[in-house]
Image (tube, rainbow, N blue to C red):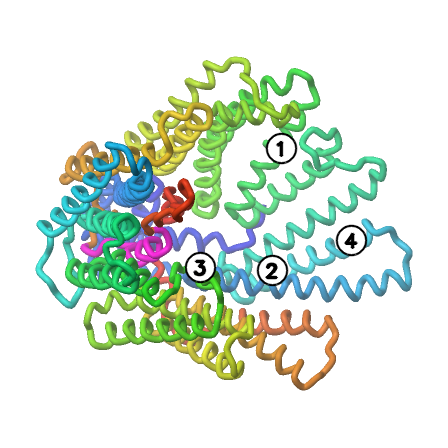
Amino acid sequence: MNKAYNPIWARNEALRTAAQRWHRRGLLPLAQLQAIREAYPLDFYRPNIYLQILLFLLTTLGYLATSGLIAMSAYELFDSVLNWRGQIKIGVVTLAAALAGQLVLQRLITSSRTYRAGSDQALLYLSLGFAAIAWQAFVDAALPNVIDFLLLDSPYLALWLLPMLVMLLWATARFGDALLAALSYAAVLGLLANGLLQFGSGRLVLPFAVMAVAAGLYQLVRYLAARTDYWYYRSCFTTLEVLALATFYLGGNYLIVREGNAAIGGLPVSTQIPFAPVFYLLTALVPLFYIWQGLRQHRRTWLLTGLVALAFSGFTVRFYYSVLPLATASALLGAVLIGLMAAALRYLRTPRHGLSADAEDGSAERPGLNLEALIVAQTAHAPQAPEPGFQFGGGQSGGGGAEGQF
Amino acid sequence: MHTDPFLAELRDRGLLTPGQSAAIATDERTRPFSLHYEIRTLLYLGITLLSGGLGVLIYEHLDQIGHGVVVAVVALLMTACLTYAARHRQPFSWGLVPGNSLLADYLLLLGCLLFLVLEGYLQAQYALFGARYGLALALPAVLFFGLAYRFDHRGVLSMAITALAAWVGLNTQPLAVFKNDFLTASVSRAAIGLGTVLLLAGWLSETQNRKAHFAYTYILLGGNLLLGAATAAMFADVLRPMILLLLLVLAVSAGLFWYGRRVHSHIFLLIGAAYGYVAFTYGLGELIEWVKLGFPFELVLFYFMASTAAAVWFLTHLKRLAGTAAHEQGI
């Protein structure tokens, strides 16, 4: 598979990052670091994250405006020359916009050497999105009697989803983009659910099938990471690993299984599910296993997925059993968290079991303080006094928004 | 280890000595696994949950015995947090103070949050400050500014700025500058004024070397407040003349853009360019309206196509012309 970006770029970038780390850890003198940097130049263009966002937004706006221009002129042409049906017209126009986007993207990469700079990603995502709309319009035109072929249990869903999966796999292999890899996996899961829901008993095995696919994906990622261009696809591998862990957990989560079962069956209120004890056990144990593995084998993907999964398990319990009033629970949980972290800081004052509480590079300045100040400005407020006459009105008790630190 | 091939290659090319290569390989294997960000995130989450929970609890069960316990717990916790932070304080300096204890920093933040909880409760229940609401709002601002400078804490600084804005009657949460209620001329003027003051404070911190690392928070919150309020006032047509507002937004955007390039803080580039682009486009539309030129929708699309393409080109080539090695920064 030919790659859109020069694979040397990814490798040089990773090598320089590693060299920078060795330098910060005092293992590599500055002169040698400079020599390595000269031997492995970075000749692609990728600005800071904020400029990437800006480039992404600007390119999206420009691409949409251009597509609008194309569409308006094309519609006039169609109306005067050809008498096609609506879906065909939409399909042709969006397909043209998709192809034009891919062409511009190719030119952009070769001429400006952009490598995930925001502008190229906007073109990539939007052009594939246009292609998806085009194919949907064509399928729609080919099946005039089928109304909702995009529903999860529609027998015609695969007609649209299977070509999308092929397109996404092609694009992932070519661009090495994490979002496309995630979408490919979502398409696989969609096809799996669609296939199983064609049978009456399929709904029963769906959770186990999802868990099996997740386990399979994890194995596949490990296989591919050892045998393909690891650095070029690194973000894909990390994303897929997290998704495999997350879907394995969610496939066995009691809340997801119970409510999903009710949603698919069209029940107004969810009822107890078969094999409930199995799901209780999975909901409780899988997050703990992830965290333990993450700490033992030093795998951040496991640790973070485990922490988020643990929070979701807590939510699952609260969803069905109201253990304590929300405010009391929140205060107690907060106190426990602070106590645990204080103990962890004290315990890890000197690194133990290969774990440390210091920042990775051991620099004196704690990184990320500016960002933290912004999060404080956004989230740190005391709940207001309730209005007189109301029993108890406002007051924000949640700690949402604190997760976005990474 | 995925970096092993790198080591072999660098050794073969003579960029590393065999001894270094072996030392690095050992370090890569034995380097401790850092839980720094995880601990910080969970600490912050714990602080938010605890103060949020207590802040709600303090108003519940007002007529029951357990209620006094909650008030006492909040007061005791606040004292304990501030005492802990005070005992772990470092000597004061106008520069960056290294080596602050991580736990002390977060407990200081918790102490400040609990102060807000307690003060709000005392005012609501016992009308401690009577009708002098201004004093009730100014007190936390003064206290937090003092604590932020004494303990060199950027989180407390942003709480101080938020409290100051509340005293003026505004909301400075970064994502809420458009949501200031009752957008009137006086609110807009206050927001623009406070934004200017904060921008100046940031600029002075940096140029006078008085806590230069506080400049980021000042300028980001102040610039966002000023630009957001001015843009909203422009759209809602509450302040006149429009042309002055437009020029103000364009000038401040350009200033932020220039500042962002100077200090390599690219979030300012993003904010400056985004507000500037919106203001410029709006001004162009008003101009065309004013001249009473009829213009078709295609022209609007064409404008967006041409202007975004120009902006992307400009930004892509800006870094190259400047020659600032963005990659070196990023690593």
The kind of secondary structure element at disc 2 is helix
Q: Which residue is mark 1?
A: A190
Write down the chain letter for disc 1: A
Count of numbered labels shown in the rendering = 4
Residue type of the residue flagged with mark 4: Ile
Looking at the rendering, the stretch of residues picked out in magenta corresponds to A364-379
| Crowd around label 2: few <14 · some 14–19 · many ≥20 (10 Å) | many
Mark number, residue A90 = 4
The kind of secondary structure element at disc 3 is helix
Q: State the separation of the CA atoms marked 1 and 2.
A: 29 Å
Q: In this view of the protein, which residue sits in the foreground, A235 or B228?
A: B228
Residue A374 among those drawn in magenta: yes
In the picture, measured across the screen, residue A318 lies left or right of residue B65, that is right
In the picture, measured across the screen, residue A243 lies left or right of residue B123, that is right
Give the mark nearest the N terminus, 4 or 1. 4
Q: State the separation of the CA atoms marked 4 and 2.
A: 22 Å
